[in-house]
Image (cartoon, grey):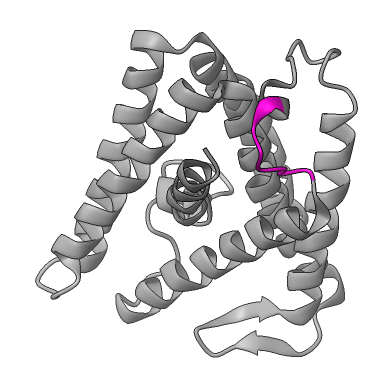
Amino acid sequence: MKSELFKRIVSSVILIPLALYFIIKGSFLLIFFLSVLFLASTYEWHQMSKKNFYLIPGFIFLLLSFVSAYLVINIYGASLFLMVIIICVFTDLGGYIFGKLIKGPKLTKLSPNKTYAGMIGGFLLSIFAFTFFIKNLEIFGFVNEFKGHQIKISDLSNLLIISLISQLGDLIVSYFKRKSKIKNTGNFLPGHGGILDRIDGIIFVVPIIYVILIFYQ
């Protein structure tokens, strides 16, 4: 675990600031960033799912998810999008750390490595990370752009729902990985696996957030 966790931390320290840069800069850089992620994700999905009936639906879903990400950033602001990403990332990290340390009863057969301890840890760490970030927006150079929107991501119930959807997305992708008899969707990210391994929760959360925001307008 220590080796894998160290790799995750090192690669995250490099990748997270890079991703933040592209998201905050927006415009062409944002389109470039999302396009690279989309192409990498669809390639991994193709490698996993070729000749299976869910190949094309998966492509369509990924396209809708990345388009939703672009629209959320451009319409509602980078700050709101980053709040969602923070919840998803720390949900995943909390699930990994608590699941490895505490272990305990398994959550589901869809993903034998998932535990109840990991699920609860995902909720707890996402709440902690979000609370810390939201209280220090000015330190990080952001303004609270989503204050004017009726949806309140900072409400505990909404935060937990986002974390839950992120965990469900993780389980769904894990299910397809098991069907393909692979551990990771790729080996692009040291300690993380493939691109889809890291954004599996995000790709499910973002379209739902976009739909909710539309209805709250």
Image point (30%, 75%), residue name: 180
Image quarter of residue 182 = bottom left
Q: Which residues are magenta?
A: 148-154
Q: In the image shown, does 13 or 39 lie closer to the viewer?
A: 39
Asked whether 140 or 14 is in front, the reply is 140
What type of secondary structure mainly makes up the magenta span? Answer: loop
Q: Residue at x 32, y 80 (%)?
A: 179
**Residue 194: percent from the left, percent from the top?**
43, 49
- Percent position of residue 216, x then y: 55, 44
Give the quadrant of residue 58: bottom left
Residue 1 seen: no
The answer to whether residue 36 is left or right of residue 3 is left
Q: Residue at x 21, y 67 (%)?
A: 49
* The image quarter in which residue 164 lies: bottom right
The image shows residue 125 at horizontal and vertical percentages of 83, 53
For this rendering, which residue is in front, 108 or 63?
Answer: 63
Residue beneath the point at 39% across and 30% down = 71
Q: Is residue 110 visible?
A: yes
Q: Is residue 84 above or below residue 182?
A: above
Membership of 122 in magenta stretch? no
Total marks drawn? 0
Residue 144: where, in percent of width, then height?
A: 74, 21
Q: Quadrant of the N terminus?
A: bottom right
Compared to residue 25, the image places residue 201 above or below, namely below
Query: Which residue is the extreme one toward the front?
Result: 217
Residue in front for this viewpoint, 179 or 201: 201
Q: Is residue 195 above or below residue 117?
A: above
